[in-house]
Amino acid sequence: MFSHIMIGTNDLDRAKSFYDVLLGTLGVSPAMVDGHRIFYRTPTGVFSVSKPINGEPASAPNGGTIGFAASSSEQADAWHAAGVANGGTSCEDPPGVREGGMGKMYLAYLRDPDGNKLCALHRMG
């Protein structure tokens, strides 16, 4: 459905340091830098972070969340811990199992240094 997701940052170097570690816990290689943007390429899509091209400050969307697939609850916990240790902020409930209309899932939420809300999600059997 998606080819890529791009979010904004006000500090590209800080964003690269944060996401290189965070996404590294999911097996994603460090970002490729392309001027004012960084790209994380995987077989299932591209995640990128960019300084706004209009010169205005980047801002986090209210009500938006970007979800990353985790292969296990342990990987989601490692993702969350790496994010918090590298400038992210834990948000929502602590990482754990949630049950609802979409089934049983293990979720871990945090905000990146620019305030973007992120989630690691592991779908449980």
Image (cartoon, grey):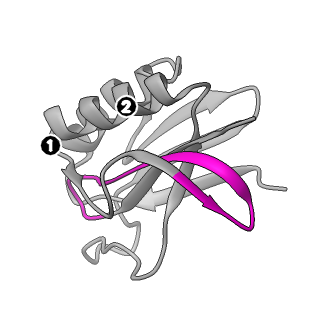
Image spot of residue 60 (x, y percent) = 34, 72
66 left or right of 59? Answer: right
Residue lying at 32% horizontally and 64% vertically, measured from the top left? 92
Question: Looking at the figure, which quarter contains the C terminus?
Answer: top right
Give whichever of 102, 64 is nearer the camera: 102
Q: Residues within 10 Å of mark 1 (few under 14, many from 20)?
A: some
Image spot of residue 98 (x, y percent) = 54, 55
Q: Identify the amino acid type marked 1.
A: Gly
Q: Residues within 10 Å of mark 2 (few under 14, many from 20)?
A: many
24 left or right of 88? Answer: right
Q: Is residue 48 magenta?
A: no
Mark 2 residue element: helix
Image spot of residue 46 (x, y percent) = 64, 40
Magenta-colored span: 98-115
Give whichever of 73, 43 is nearer the camera: 73
Query: Does the image show residue 31?
Result: no
Q: Which mark is residue 87?
A: 1
Q: Which mark is residue 76?
A: none
17 left or right of 95? Answer: left
Query: Does the image show residue 21?
Result: yes
Residue lying at 27% horizontally and 60% vertically, measured from the top left? 91
Q: Identify the amino acid type marked 2.
A: Asp
Among the 4 quarters of the image, the one containing residue 77: top left
For marks 2 and 1, the one nearer the N-term is 2
Question: Which SS type dominates the magenta stretch?
Answer: strand
Which residue is under mark 2?
77
Image spot of residue 68 (x, y percent) = 56, 43
